[in-house]
Image (tube, grey):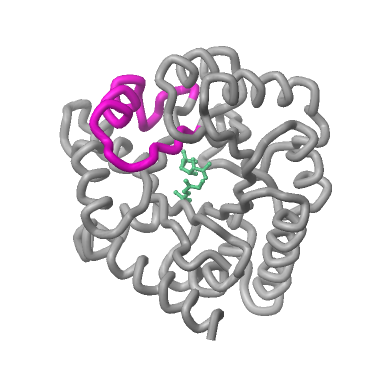
């Protein structure tokens, strides 16, 4: 088990708020700096094809000014590959995108799109970018990620977060089994989507996980607690879950 489970803070929805008025406030870069000062190990930003939140200029500034790893979430399109290979972020996480969706609804079908994804993974890897594939906790998709040449997968935690009671426990078991399987076939395993204070602990306790990416909840909670305090509380919950799992 990695000693410290890394926390990537996704700052997309600072840009959502900024874009609501069309100006420059609140600034996603300032949010990224605050999150890092409060304990984030990296920053995640999703440049959607429709630019509904993060924009090209945000990615440029994050890359130029951040002193921690930048995780560029992107669709596997020629446009995004061109932007990523020019910017050269530390990591790129390939996610499925449907323009009309409210948020990312599921994982990538890596097994069903292997030849195209092999090309994208190869292009990003050749640019020195560590590639991750955002997938459902399904062993078939993890096996396909290895076949695609990706060193990392991020398990989609949305279904777990939305489920309740026994269904949530079943989803947690799926995540834990997928994390074990991923580690056994040599993948670095991350997780994220929809996590909040009430759901993060059991996921953070999965020993094979190396990183969590959390955004929407933290930006929402920042309205009440401030962003720095929201990140600090999340960090404490993650560390506590990790420590009790190790004991
Ligand atoms: C892939 C993913 O989970 C993140 O990109 C997150 O969902 C924030 O972006 P959206 O809210 O636009 O989906
Ligand atoms: N890849 C997941 C992510 O970056 C954050 O998702 P969310 O916490 O905004 O749902």
Q: Is residue 66 above or below residue 215?
A: above
Of 215 and 68, the residue lying toward us:
68
Q: Is residue 145 above or below residue 9?
A: above
The x, y position of residue 48, in whole percent, is: 47, 28
Quadrant housing residue 206: bottom right
Of 117 and 90, the residue lying toward us:
90
The x, y position of residue 167, in whole percent, is: 70, 72
Q: Is residue 169 above or below residue 218?
A: below
Of 61 and 171, the residue lying toward us:
61
Q: In the image as oriented, which residue stretches furthest toward the bottom?
A: 247
218 falls in the magenta region: no
Give, as a single range, the part of the protein colored magenta.
49-73
- In the visual, does 14 lie left or right of 246? left
Quadrant housing residue 133: top right
Which residue: 54% across, 80% down? 246
Which residue: 31% across, 70% down? 233
The x, y position of residue 127, in whole percent, is: 53, 20
Q: Quadrant of the N terminus?
A: bottom right
Which residue: 30% across, 31% down? 62
- In the visual, does 75 lie left or right of 118? left
Which residue: 76% across, 39% down? 146
The x, y position of residue 139, in whole percent, is: 80, 52
């Amino acid at each position: 088990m990695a000693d410290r489970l890394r926390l990537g803070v996704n700052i997309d929805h600072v840009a959502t708020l900024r874009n609501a008025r069309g100006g420059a406030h609140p600034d996603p870069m300032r949010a990224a700096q605050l999150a890092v000062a409060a304990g984030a190990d990296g920053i995640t930003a999703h440049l959607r094809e429709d630019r509904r939140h993060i924009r090209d200029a945000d990615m440029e500034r994050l890359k130029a000014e951040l002193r921690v790893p930048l995780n560029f979430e992107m669709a596997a399109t020629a446009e995004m590959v061109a932007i990523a290979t020019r910017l050269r972020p530390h990591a790129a996480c390939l996610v499925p995108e449907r323009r009309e969706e409210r948020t990312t609804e599921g994982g990538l079908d890596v097994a069903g799109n292997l030849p195209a994804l092999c090309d994208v993974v190869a292009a990003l890897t050749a640019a020195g970018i560590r590639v991750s594939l955002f997938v459902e906790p399904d062993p078939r998709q993890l096996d396909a990620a290895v076949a695609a040449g990706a060193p990392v997968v991020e398990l989609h935690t949305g279904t777990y977060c939305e489920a309740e009671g026994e269904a949530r426990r079943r989803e947690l078991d799926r995540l834990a089994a997928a994390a074990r399987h991923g580690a056994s076939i040599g993948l670095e395993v991350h997780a994220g989507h929809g996590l909040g204070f009430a759901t993060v602990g059991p996921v953070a306790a999965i020993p094979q996980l190396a990183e969590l990416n959390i955004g929407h909840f933290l930006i929402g909670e920042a309205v009440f607690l401030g962003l720095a305090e929201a990140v600090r509380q999340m960090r404490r919950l993650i560390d506590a879950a990790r420590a009790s799992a190790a004991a």
